[in-house]
Image (cartoon, coloured by chain):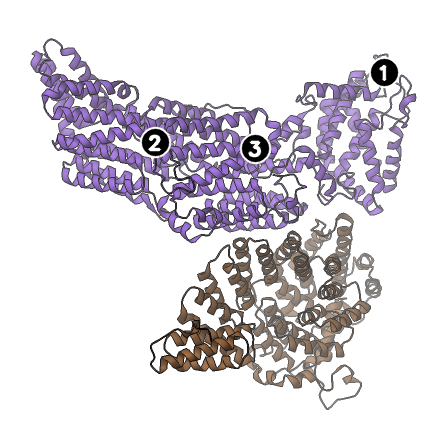
């Protein structure tokens, strides 16, 4: 079909259109009074009319249906008379034996049109109003045919031959089955009132207008609108849907097609296109969406898309967007060179003007092209392929060029991309890069730390996006801001720009505000989706990168959850919001979960993660989904013990094996480490810790957070091995590192660790200031859970000073209890219970015999929880205390039971080998 | 060495056979070579020498060249002496004669139809060949019918399928001759089956080496030196023609020149060899020599249009307006509907600064031949001149997509992006162009300039590029000067002095003067003075004294300072005293 004539602008006569014309002739034969021959009823007649109307509406589709498909549809529409219709159609085609017949055919077509002065229509006459939809179609066909040169007519003629030949083989098979239907046509309803044809169409139009988005041809077989050639899902062209697909892909591909009106404008004058129309653009966008969402699933083959695109490119060399799709495809199949090649080719050909309708096409930039967008894309591509330095250089250039051309939209996106890049690259590697680069934005801030730069970039981007009303960018910027606020807390910004006094407070409120702002804008946007096309064009690429970030830094250990993998499967969501928006919302939930986790509410964190996993699981990127899995597994480990966590981890490993193992690997190491520590297998713990440290220093740079975490764990191992002075040394140097790199949260936990070390070494007085400092840190950063556990440590320290402080310790503990019991993990809770028992027992005013239940309850709780945690050390302590209490009470049997439990735990602690085996 | 007489006999027979099969361009080519063979003095007749230059001015002028290149007797010429195939029918069939006359009247389908049931090899070949050409003709027409302006088309030769089927059947039965193999190769190539096409063409040229069309098809398939080396070709003097051509297309110009030099021993008067030599020299940027060669060529063959676009490029580069317009006029009268002619006219307008008109003619050239690569590139240049960068980029990109190794187009792309203030983006394109032509100093300099732009300001990289440029014998002398300046800027005075000295040497050798000279002298004088090397400093100062202007005053004060320092006065910077 491809080689058909396309001389007269966008509209060319094709065999399919001739079929439609033939059907139209049946529908409205010239000089026919009343209902024409084959129709048995007016409703039947109208049915065909509606069908024809939808055919003419869809005739601008890229792929026209083959004759065979048309006949199939006719069978559905025509009911009893379909055989007649089919026969007539094929006969008519076979009667076209020479080009002259074509000429005559179109002459005849002219006859079915009414005369222009339609005032004198008789009552019962069927006349095709030249100004109706069908009439217009006929006129366009006639005009297009008249414009054809003789060569064109010859081509049309030969393509008709092909068209019929294709259908020939298949049509034979249902000829036989249907020939009896002809007899069923009867005329008993001839006396029905006669309709003027356009009345029907008028009604239809009215109905369409009234019902707004109701697709006006719901009754037609949907096959009609399917894109043939077996590629992905059908692309129906109901106004609502088509606008949706267009919109969806707008962000998916960066190829926004502006509002439909402008697209149609451009269609008219681009005569070079094979079939210049919305559908081909829409189709390409659909493809792009497919590339984006299915990139991780194995069922999606990039080579099939590639071959299809190649074919398309041969057919329509001037359709440059194909190059972009090839780029996207290559990008997702990780083919650097081909991706680069196609990206450059796309921008060379299209000058960035095709598809990127960020501004009205009439804007002054048209002369220069929009190559800055090319730079932006190139930068993000480099980033994706792991060349952050190159990416930064390119983005810097993008900033400069968009400033030069005053393309604020692009600038906003570029700044956002840049800040994303900087925050991703981490602290250690970025400083060297920025030092060498020259840029108006970065150079002014050359004295600032990377975080400060990220902050400035984000602010700038947000400001621009806000003023340009780029909702999606605003939303994602808010999210990034929230993330930033969450991670970089209360840094003194003494040398900060012109406004030196500006201080940078961080509290949950502002994080929450940012998240809410982000989500709010998105919901805004999804409600008025029709106007968004201009907005969000670039955000998907932006989003693509946004998805990756939420990394390990904010993953804290003390929260837990219960999880089952079925949660991930039950998402049947048929929301009509575009994919990227739902991704963005999903990201906001994930971020919310992280912030809750961070501020110490495990249930809230779990809830948000679950919301994410259930609602956004299928639209999310694989890295986001992976993160959600990880969070849930962590919860599991903290609240259900390691056995469950490892089972879940196995599932997750299977699921994400192909994508990227690093995050999973990290979690596995963490879990193994904790478990080894609990079981007293220090050697294994040390090994895990070393591997963790190895992960921290990759080729791309040093991940400070991970490094700190590794040494924190090392200190814990030393502590468990009772090497107090060494542990303290590690803790001290760690604190210095944290201070140097502004890692405030880690500072708090390091302080807590130091307090812990002193407590364990029996030097409670030294431990007190550390514990207090940690508490004050937690207080200022609103780290409630950490604060609770610091309080617990403080109380323990007090008790360590002597039994006369038991009352005070108990008070402290009771103050922290709500937090610990409500949000803390198994270990923390167990510790609190044991400590409570300890306090009571050491309190001289407490008598075991009278109030034994208070103590025993706590201890029983503690040992239950520790059992599932396999924390032998604490469990041994609990059973010991229990045994003591029972001893006091004289309950010998129970005492023996507790004692044997104690013995069991002690033995397990001393012989960790067997534990290691079932772990591996 | 092959005897000239045997060559001549081979070619004579070949021309007859080729024309019998209507392989006219191959016959034409062979004919050119035939008269290109130097006549033996023995059968020297005035009528024979009509086409030969009695005295080739070129030969005399560049006699040095010839003496250098000693022919390599062992390489190509163990001469397996491919026997000329006997014609299989002595008397041509009547139908064949009819078909051939149809063919000559360009009624291909008719010719093919006449020969449909013939069995003689000649007729069979002509039958298929005519069919192929008929398909090609229809394809061309369809392209026009189906297509808008400029761009690909999906029109295909509809005969290819049946041709491939029939020819492969013939080949299986062994009833195919070397001409049939050639056609089979062509068909396979069009169908995209390159390896089979190469095999078929190699077989064809090995059994019948005189078919130049087969050789050139083979060349078009040798896109890399590896493919070329892998070919299993019999030795024949035609192979040297082929290798010369193939080397040239692979940008191995010196190797190609050597081949042509060798061939010139036999075909001393071949226009073809001369044009090819000129082409190679053009790529080596020996414009003066190329111009003389083309003048000579035109004198001997005044109505030649082939390769004249190259000549016009030379004239363009030398800004010879009058000569270019003369050439354009002449070519226009000879055949105005040749892409070369349009290109020449475009070049002329471009030189005159009428870029719109130039673009129009380049467009016309492209209409005449879609694959006419240089027109896209030249059009890109015009658009750059017209400051229409997007259009320029588009044009260059099309050139690159036709031939990815067109370094000029890559360079043009880089330039265009640099013009738009995107130097980092442009770097990629410069790198591409340098990849294809690593020995051109201009490309290195362009890249260095890119690094030097204030936006990037990556001076170290720029220095590296300039160094490469210097190594590639930078004729314009920009690199040395820039190297010196960059080093000066970076405070590396030793290196700067080194490069200034080198630059000075170069300028002395070429007898140039100018601000660069002053700059170098002033820097060197001050530099040596500061390092207490007064003698050197004095030398440079005295050289400066030869010129008037502020430099002279500067030199004077420097000299005074030197004297002062030499006589042991406490060092005082006298420069700051008013004199």
Height in image: A643 above or below A700?
A: above
Instruction: Tell me whether the residue at label 3 lies in contact with that at label 1, contact meaning CB atoms closer than 8 angstroms.
Output: no
Whether labels 3 and 1 belong to a single chain: the reply is yes
Question: In terms of secondary structure, where does tag 2 sit?
Answer: helix
Q: Position of residue A261 (x, y in %)?
A: 69, 33
Question: In terms of secondary structure, where does tag 1 sit?
Answer: loop
Height in image: A195 above or below A308?
A: above
Q: Is residue A242 left or right of residue B53?
A: left
Instruction: Tell me whether the residue at label 1 lies in contact with that at label 2, contact meaning CB atoms closer than 8 angstroms.
Output: no
Q: Is residue B102 left or right of residue B300?
A: right
Q: CA distance from mark 3 to mark 1?
A: 54 Å
Question: Which disc is residue A469 wearing?
Answer: 3
- Tell me which numbered mark, 1 or 2, is placed earlier along the sequence: 1
Say which chain is purple. Answer: A
Residue at mark 1: chain:
A
Residue at mark 2: chain:
A
Say which chain is brown. Answer: B
Which image quadrant for residue B345?
Answer: bottom right
Q: Position of residue A439 (x, y in %)?
A: 48, 50
Question: Which disc is residue A802 wearing?
Answer: none
Q: Position of residue A24 (x, y in %)?
A: 81, 28
Question: Which disc is residue A649 wearing?
Answer: 2
How many residues crowd around disc 1 within 10 Å: few (fewer than 14), some, or many (20 or more)? Answer: some
Whether labels 1 and 2 belong to a single chain: the reply is yes
The C terminus of chain A - image quarter: top left
Q: Which residue is mark 1?
A: A194
Residue at mark 3: chain:
A
Q: CA distance from mark 2 to mark 3?
A: 42 Å
Residue at 59% over, 69% down: B247
Q: Nearer the viewer, residue A10 or B490?
A: B490
Q: Nearer the viewer, residue A209 or A90?
A: A209
Q: Position of residue B144 (x, y in %)?
A: 77, 52
């Amino acid at each position: 079909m491809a080689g058909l004539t396309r001389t007269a602008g966008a509209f060319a006569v094709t065999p399919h259109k001739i079929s439609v014309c033939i059907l139209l002739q049946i529908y409205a034969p010239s000089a026919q009074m009343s209902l024409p021959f084959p129709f048995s009823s007016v409703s039947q007649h109208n049915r065909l009319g509606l069908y024809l109307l939808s055919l003419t509406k869809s005739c601008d589709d890229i792929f026209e249906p083959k004759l065979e498909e048309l006949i199939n549809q006719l069978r559905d529409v025509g009911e009893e008379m379909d055989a007649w219709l089919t026969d007539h159609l094929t006969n008519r085609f076979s009667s076209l034996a020479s080009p002259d017949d074509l000429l005559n055919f179109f002459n005849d077509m002219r006859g079915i049109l009414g005369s222009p002065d339609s005032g004198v229509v008789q009552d019962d006459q069927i006349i095709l109003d030249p100004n109706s939809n069908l009439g217009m179609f006929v006129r366009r066909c006639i005009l297009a045919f008249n414009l054809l040169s003789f060569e064109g007519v010859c081509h049309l003629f030969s393509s008709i031959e092909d068209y019929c030949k294709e259908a020939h083989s298949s049509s034979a098979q249902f000829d036989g089955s249907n020939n009896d239907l002809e007899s069923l046509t009867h005329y008993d309803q001839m006396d029905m009132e006669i309709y003027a044809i356009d009345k029907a169409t008028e009604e239809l139009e009215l109905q369409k207008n009234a019902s707004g988005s109701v697709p006006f041809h719901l009754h037609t077989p949907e096959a009609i609108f399917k894109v043939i050639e077996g590629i992905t899902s059908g692309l129906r062209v109901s106004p609502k849907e088509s606008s949706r697909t267009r919109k969806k892909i707008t962000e998916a591909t960066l190829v926004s097609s502006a509002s439909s009106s402008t697209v149609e404008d451009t269609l008219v004058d681009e005569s070079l296109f094979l079939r210049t129309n919305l559908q081909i653009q829409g189709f390409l966008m659909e493809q792009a969406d497919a590339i984006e969402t299915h990139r991780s699933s194995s069922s999606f083959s990039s080579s099939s898309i590639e071959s299809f695109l190649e074919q398309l490119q041969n057919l329509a060399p001037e359709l440059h967007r194909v190059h972009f799709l090839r780029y996207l495809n290559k990008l997702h199949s990780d083919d650097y060179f081909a991706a680069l090649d196609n990206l450059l080719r796309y921008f060379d050909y299209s000058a960035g003007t095709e598809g990127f309708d960020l501004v009205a096409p009439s804007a002054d930039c048209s002369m220069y092209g929009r190559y800055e967008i090319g730079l932006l894309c190139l930068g993000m591509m480099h980033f994706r392929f792991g060349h952050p330095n190159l990416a930064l250089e390119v983005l810097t250039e993008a900033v400069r060029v968009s400033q030069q051309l005053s393309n604020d939209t692009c600038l906003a996106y570029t700044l956002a991309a840049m800040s994303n890049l900087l925050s991703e690259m981490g602290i250690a590697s970025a400083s060297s890069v920025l030092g060498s680069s020259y840029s108006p934005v970065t150079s002014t801030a050359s004295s600032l730390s990377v975080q400060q730069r990220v902050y400035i970039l984000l602010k700038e981007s947000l400001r621009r996006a806000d003023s340009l009303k780029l909702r999606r960018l605003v939303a994602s910027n808010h999210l990034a801001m929230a993330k930033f606020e969450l991670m970089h807390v209360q840094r003194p910004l003494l040398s900060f720009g012109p406004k030196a006094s500006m201080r940078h407070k961080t509290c949950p409120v502002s994080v929450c505000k940012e998240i809410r702002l982000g989500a709010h804008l998105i919901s805004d946007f999804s409600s008025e989706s029709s106007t968004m096309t201009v907005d969000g064009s670039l955000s998907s690429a932006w989003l693509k990168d946004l998805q990756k970030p939420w990394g390990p830094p904010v993953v804290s250990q003390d929260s837990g959850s219960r999880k089952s993998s079925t949660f991930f499967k039950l998402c049947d969501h048929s929301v009509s919001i575009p994919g990227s928006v739902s991704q963005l919302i999903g990201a906001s939930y994930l971020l919310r979960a992280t912030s809750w986790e961070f501020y110490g509410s495990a249930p809230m964190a779990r809830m948000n993660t679950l919301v994410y996993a259930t609602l956004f699981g299928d639209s999310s990127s694989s890295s986001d989904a992976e993160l959600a899995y990880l969070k849930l597994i962590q919860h599991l480990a903290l609240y259900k013990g390691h056995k469950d966590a490892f089972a879940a981890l196995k599932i997750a490993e299977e699921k994400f094996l192909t994508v990227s193992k690093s995050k999973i690997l990290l979690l596995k190491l963490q879990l193994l480490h904790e478990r080894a520590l609990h079981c007293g297998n220090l050697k294994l713990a040390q090994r895990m810790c070393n591997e963790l440290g190895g992960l921290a220093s990759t080729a791309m740079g040093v991940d400070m957070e991970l490094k700190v975490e590794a040494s924190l764990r090392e200190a814990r191992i030393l502590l468990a091995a009772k090497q107090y002075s060494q542990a303290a040394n590690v803790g001290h140097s760690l604190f210095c590192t944290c201070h140097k790199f502004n890692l405030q949260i880690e500072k708090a936990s390091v302080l807590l660790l130091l307090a812990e070390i002193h407590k364990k070494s029996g030097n409670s007085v030294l431990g007190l200031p550390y514990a207090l400092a940690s508490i004050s840190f937690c207080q200022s950063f609103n780290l409630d859970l950490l604060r609770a556990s610091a309080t617990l440590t403080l109380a323990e320290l007090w008790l360590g000073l002597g039994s006369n402080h038991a009352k005070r310790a108990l008070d402290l503990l009771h103050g922290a209890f709500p937090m610990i019991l409500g949000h803390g993990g198994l270990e923390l809770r167990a510790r609190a219970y044991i400590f409570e028992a300890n306090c009571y027992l050491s309190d001289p005013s407490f008598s075991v015999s009278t109030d034994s239940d208070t103590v025993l309850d706590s201890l029983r709780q503690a040992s239950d929880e520790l059992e599932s945690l396999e924390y032998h050390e604490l469990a041994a302590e609990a059973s010991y205390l229990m045994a003591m209490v029972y001893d006091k009470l004289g309950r010998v049997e129970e005492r023996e039971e507790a004692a044997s439990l104690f013995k069991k735990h002690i033995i397990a602690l001393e012989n960790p080998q067997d534990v290691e085996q079932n772990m591996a | 060495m092959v005897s000239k007489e045997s060559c001549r006999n081979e070619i004579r027979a070949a021309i007859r056979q080729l024309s019998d099969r209507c392989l006219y361009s191959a016959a034409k080519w062979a004919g050119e070579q035939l008269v290109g063979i130097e006549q033996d003095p023995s059968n020297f007749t005035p009528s024979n020498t009509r086409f030969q230059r009695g005295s080739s001015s070129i030969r005399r002028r560049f006699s040095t060249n010839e003496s250098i290149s000693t022919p390599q007797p062992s390489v190509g010429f163990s001469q397996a002496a491919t026997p000329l195939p006997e014609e299989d029918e002595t008397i041509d069939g009547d139908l064949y004669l009819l078909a051939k006359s149809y063919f000559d009247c360009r009624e291909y389908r008719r010719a093919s139809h006449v020969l449909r049931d013939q069995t003689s090899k000649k007729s069979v070949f002509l039958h298929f060949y005519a069919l192929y050409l008929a398909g090609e003709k229809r394809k061309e027409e369809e392209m026009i019918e189906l297509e808008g302006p400029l761009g690909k088309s999906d029109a295909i030769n509809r005969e290819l399928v049946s041709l491939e089927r029939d020819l492969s059947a013939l080949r299986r039965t062994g009833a195919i001759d070397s001409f049939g193999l050639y056609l089979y190769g062509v068909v396979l190539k069009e169908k995209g089956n390159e390896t089979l096409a190469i095999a078929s063409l190699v077989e064809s040229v090995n059994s019948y080496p005189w078919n130049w069309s087969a050789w050139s098809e083979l060349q078009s398939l040798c896109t890399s030196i590896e493919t070329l080396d892998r070919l299993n070709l019999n030795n024949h003097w035609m192979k040297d023609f082929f290798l010369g051509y193939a080397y040239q297309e692979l940008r191995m110009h010196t190797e190609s020149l050597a081949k042509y030099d060798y061939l010139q021993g036999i075909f001393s008067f071949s226009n073809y060899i001369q044009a090819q030599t000129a082409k190679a020299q053009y790529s080596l940027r020996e414009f003066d020599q190329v111009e003389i060669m083309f003048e000579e060529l035109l004198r001997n063959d005044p109505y030649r249009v082939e390769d004249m676009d190259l000549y016009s490029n030379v004239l363009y580069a030398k800004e010879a307006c009058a000569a270019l317009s003369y050439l354009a006029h002449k070519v226009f009268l000879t055949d105005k509907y040749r892409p070369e002619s349009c290109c020449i006219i475009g070049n002329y307008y471009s030189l005159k600064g009428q870029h719109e008109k130039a673009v129009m003619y380049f467009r016309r050239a492209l209409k005449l031949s879609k694959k006419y690569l240089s027109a896209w590139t030249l059009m890109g240049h015009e658009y750059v001149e017209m400051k229409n960068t997007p259009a320029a980029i588009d044009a260059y990109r099309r050139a690159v997509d036709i031939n990815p190794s067109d370094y000029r187009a890559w360079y043009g792309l880089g330039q265009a992006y640099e013009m738009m203030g995107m130097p980092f983006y442009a770097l990629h394109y410069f790198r591409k162009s340098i990849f294809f032509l690593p020995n051109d100093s201009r490309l290195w300099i362009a890249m260095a300039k890119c690094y030097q732009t204030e936006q990037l300001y990556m001076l170290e990289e720029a220095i590296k590029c300039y160094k490469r440029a210097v190594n590639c014998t930078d004729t314009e002398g920009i690199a040395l000067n820039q190297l010196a300046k960059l080093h000066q800027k970076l405070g590396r005075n030793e290196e700067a002095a080194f490069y200034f000295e080198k630059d000075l040497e170069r300028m002395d050798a070429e007898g140039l003067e100018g601000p660069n000279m002053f700059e170098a002298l002033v820097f060197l004088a001050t530099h040596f003075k500061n390092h207490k090397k007064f003698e050197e400093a004095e030398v440079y100062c005295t050289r400066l004294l030869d010129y008037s202007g502020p430099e002279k005053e500067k030199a004077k004060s420097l000299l005074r300072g030197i004297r002062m320092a030499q006589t042991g006065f406490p060092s005082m910077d006298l420069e700051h005293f008013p004199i």
